[in-house]
Structure formats: C-alpha cells, structure tokens
C-alpha cells in the first residue's frame, strides 16, 4: 500500500524543476526525504530514550511514510482513527495514547484491539474511567500529566491539560495502588524556544515522584521541540538534548526510561509548499492557498514565526528563475471568498512580483496539512518529491 502510493508521487531534481514541469495552478506539497531522515536521526541519535512521532502534527500518509522511513517506530496517537491509520500502514509500529481525555470506550478498544498499553491521565475521573476499561492494569503504563509553568514556548499547552504537582502526586499513588505502572509526563508547549523549560519540567517530575513516594517507571517529555522558523531565535538542537541529559542526572546514577513525542521538530523541515500568485492588485496579492488551507498556524495569538520563502517566475524559455530585488510588504489573501482569509501579517516579497509567479515556502510540514479545510472548495492535496 505505502510502497505504491510512494511510487506514484512524481519525483524531481529540485524545486525549480517542479515549477517548470508542473507550472502548478494548485498548491503543491514538496517532500524532501533527506530532511525527514536528518530530523529523525537527530532524535534517534541524541535523545536518551524512545522517540514517538505525534501524529496530529501531520497525519498525511505521504508524511507518515517519510517519518517511518527515517526510522521512527513509535507514534503518539490521540484517537482511534489515528491508531487505525498507523497500525494499518505500519503493522510493526507501536502506538501510545498520550491524550489525557478520552471518549468512553476508546481506551478499551485501543487496549484490546490494538494492544496499546500507554495512556495519560490528569484527573481522578479519567483515571477511574481508564481503570474500568483496561482489564489487566499490570500491563499498562499510566502517565500522569503535570502542568508546567509558562516558559519558552510560543504556544502553551498546560492551561487545558495537566495537574499541579500535588494533585499529580496523589494520582501517581492511585496509579501505583491500581497495579498499573506509574509514570509521569508533561508538555512544555509547542515551538519551545527555551531548552531550560525541559529541565524545569524534569525537576517538577522528580519532585512529584518524591512527594508521592513512588518510583516512576517512565518519564515522557512530550513534544515542543522547535522548528527553525525565521522570526524565532531557535537554539541549536543539541542544547535541548544536553539540557535534558543534565536534568536527568539529578535522578541519581540511573534515571527512569524516558520518551519524547515531538511532532513539529520531526517533520517541519521536510516539506516545502509551492503557491501561485493568482492576481496582484497594487500591494495586495491573491494566492491559491491561505489560512483555511496551509497557513492556519500563522493566525495563532502571539505567533511571531513565519516561513522562509523565495519567489520564482518562468522566463520565455519556460525556465524557473528566482525573482529578486528590493522587498516590500504585500498583503496576502487566500483563495476563498471569506474576508478573514488573509495572512495576518504582510509578506515581504520582491517589488516586481506578478500574477503567475510562484512563492516557495519552506519548513511547512507542521500543523499546515493537518489543519487544512475544504472551505469553499479549496483543498490543497497535490504532492511531489524532490531528491532522495
Ligand atoms: C501536540 C502534542 C505533541 C506534539 O507537539 P509538538 O509541539 O508538535 O512537538 C506531543 N504530545 C502531545 C500530548 C501533544 O498534544
């Protein structure tokens, strides 16, 4: 299944060739296999435990194949459809159910039908529900999620989920008493620009376990590792791994087995997006993709990152040449009839940009494809591969 779908994707030597040969009037997602492999390698080589890919960041089969191809065999899945997607495509993959709130019956199905044994809770109600649904708790690792303070993340994730360290300690005791394996987890927030946030959270986890008097069987550090978007000062990757290792040393000579579940950092760099300028009206551009398509994340409150981009035009011989020149701010509208379909901030583009030109955006894989809609009939879904 995956092999044929992969084979069907058109392959090109470079982005220019995609533009020249397809002259795409529809947005095109361009996969870079080498970049996916490099991102996977970073985690597999430098993180001191299992790396799970958080499927919600991009569940497109074309992207999942790249993640799997990079050597990732563990997946953070938050629903039965995500588990079915992963197990159907990669029978040897391991799914971990790391969402703290589940609909009734879902944990039972995950446990019995798919052999999922990792679950997360952050309150008594969900723990009761979970324990009622899994027959043999001894097989399960139950991760209590602790809320972490606002740190260096561009998008915080601890106001919706996570218990205080006191409540987490009480839950941890209950998990241990149930016969399940007591574990802890946190998520420092997405696009976290401060490696120290992980150290702080590890310390909170250590304190929680001590308070509970429970020896934890695993510590899951969530996701949040950043992508190198312009507009953010992103520290080098190894600072995150070094900081995490240093924090783990406070557990003593041995620390519990650790996991992480990056979405963004495992994929962001692997995808470019080619968008065409449909119309230029003064300083306004009308593009064939917008916030209801691939650009939803730009609308997040407080989001300062943007996507690196270049402009290409076809010359008389049909060659794609980069358009350069002085950059000016352009308002960028998406293709739907909705007034809100406009990028929240202007795009800096060469002043000579014209209808028919192509804008290539980089580092586009995370929370773009996953959040696209078919609003007004526009659903970007054309794929290509560049390089090996
Ligand atoms: C969204 C999410 C992730 C992935 O977060 P990134 O910021 O993309 O790394 C991991 N774990 C959980 C529980 C999540 O909700």
Image: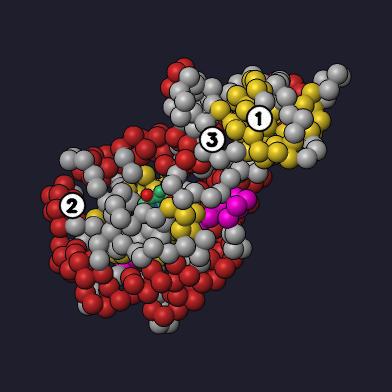
Label 1 to label 3, Cα distance in Å? 14 Å
Q: Under 8 Å from ligand 1: the CB of mark 3? A: no
In the rendered view, would you say 58 is above or below 283? below
Residue at the spot x=15%, y=49% of the render? 129
Q: Nearer the viewer, mark 3 or mark 2?
A: 3
In the rendered view, would you say 140 is above or below 164? above
Q: Nearer the viewer, mark 1 or mark 3?
A: 1
Residue furthest to the front in view is 282
Left of 71 or right of it: where is 372? left
Q: Earlier in the sequence, mark 3 or mark 2?
A: 2
User: Is residue 140 or residue 335 the one in the foreground?
Assistant: 335
Count numbered badges in the picture: 3
In the rendered view, would you say 175 is above or below 213? above
Q: Which of marks 2 and 1 is in front?
A: 1
Left of 126 or right of it: where is 298? right
Residue for badge 2:
126
Give the residues drawn in magenta, as a range: 217-232
User: Is residue 269 or residue 282 the one in the foreground?
Assistant: 282
> Was residue 366 drawn as part of the magenta stretch in this picture?
no
Residue at the spot x=23%, y=44% of the render? 102
Quick one: SS at disc 1?
loop
Left of 175 or right of it: where is 58? right
Say whether marks 2 and 1 touch (CB < 8 Å): no
User: Is residue 19 or residue 159 the one in the foreground?
Assistant: 159
Q: Give the colouring mode of the picture.
A: secondary structure
- What is the number of the mark on residue 343? 3
Q: Which of marks 2 and 1 is nearer the N terminus?
A: 2
Residue for badge 1:
283
Label 2 to label 1, Cα distance in Å? 52 Å
Q: How crowded is mark 3: few (under 14 residues within 10 Å), some or many (20 or more)?
A: many
Residue furthest to the right in view is 317
Identify the image quadrant of residue 89.
Answer: top left
């Amino acid at each position: 299944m995956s092999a044929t779908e992969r084979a069907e994707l058109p392959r090109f030597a470079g982005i220019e060739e995609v533009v020249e040969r397809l002259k795409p009037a529809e947005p095109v997602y361009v996969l870079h296999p080498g970049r996916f492999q490099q991102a996977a390698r970073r985690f597999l080589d430098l993180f001191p435990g299992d790396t799970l890919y958080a499927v919600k960041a991009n569940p497109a089969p074309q992207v999942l194949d790249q993640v799997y191809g990079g050597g990732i065999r563990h997946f953070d899945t938050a629903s039965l459809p995500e588990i079915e997607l992963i197990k159907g495509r990669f029978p040897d993959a391991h799914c971990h159910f790391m969402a703290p709130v589940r609909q009734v019956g879902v944990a039972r199905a995950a446990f019995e039908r798919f052999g999922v044994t990792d679950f997360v809770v952050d309150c008594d109600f969900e723990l009761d529900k979970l324990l009622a649904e899994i027959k043999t708790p001894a097989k399960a690792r139950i991760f209590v999620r602790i809320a972490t303070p606002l740190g260096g993340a561009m998008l915080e994730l601890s106001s919706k989920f996570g218990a205080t360290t006191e409540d987490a300690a009480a839950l941890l005791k209950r998990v241990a008493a149930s016969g399940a394996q007591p574990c802890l987890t946190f998520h420092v927030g997405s696009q976290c620009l401060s490696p120290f946030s992980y150290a702080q959270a590890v310390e909170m986890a250590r304190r929680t376990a001590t308070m509970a008097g429970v020896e934890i069987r695993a510590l899951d550090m969530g996701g949040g590792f950043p992508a190198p978007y312009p507009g953010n000062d992103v520290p080098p990757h190894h600072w995150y791994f070094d900081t995490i290792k240093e924090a783990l040393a406070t557990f003593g000579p041995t620390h519990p087995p650790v996991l992480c579940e990056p979405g963004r950092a495992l994929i962001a760099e692997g995808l470019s997006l080619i968008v065409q300028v449909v119309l230029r009206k003064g300083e306004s551009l009308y593009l064939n993709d917008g916030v209801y398509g691939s650009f939803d994340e730009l609308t997040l409150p407080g989001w300062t990152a943007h996507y690196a981009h270049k402009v290409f035009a076809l010359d008389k011989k049909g060659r794609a040449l980069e358009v350069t020149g002085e950059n000016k701010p352009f308002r960028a509208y998406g293709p739907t009839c909705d007034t809100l379909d406009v990028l929240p901030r202007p795009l800096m583009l060469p002043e000579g940009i014209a209808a028919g030109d192509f804008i290539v955006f980089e580092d586009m894989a995370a929370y773009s494809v996953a959040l696209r809609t078919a609003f007004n009939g526009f659903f970007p879904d054309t794929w290509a591969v560049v390089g090996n």
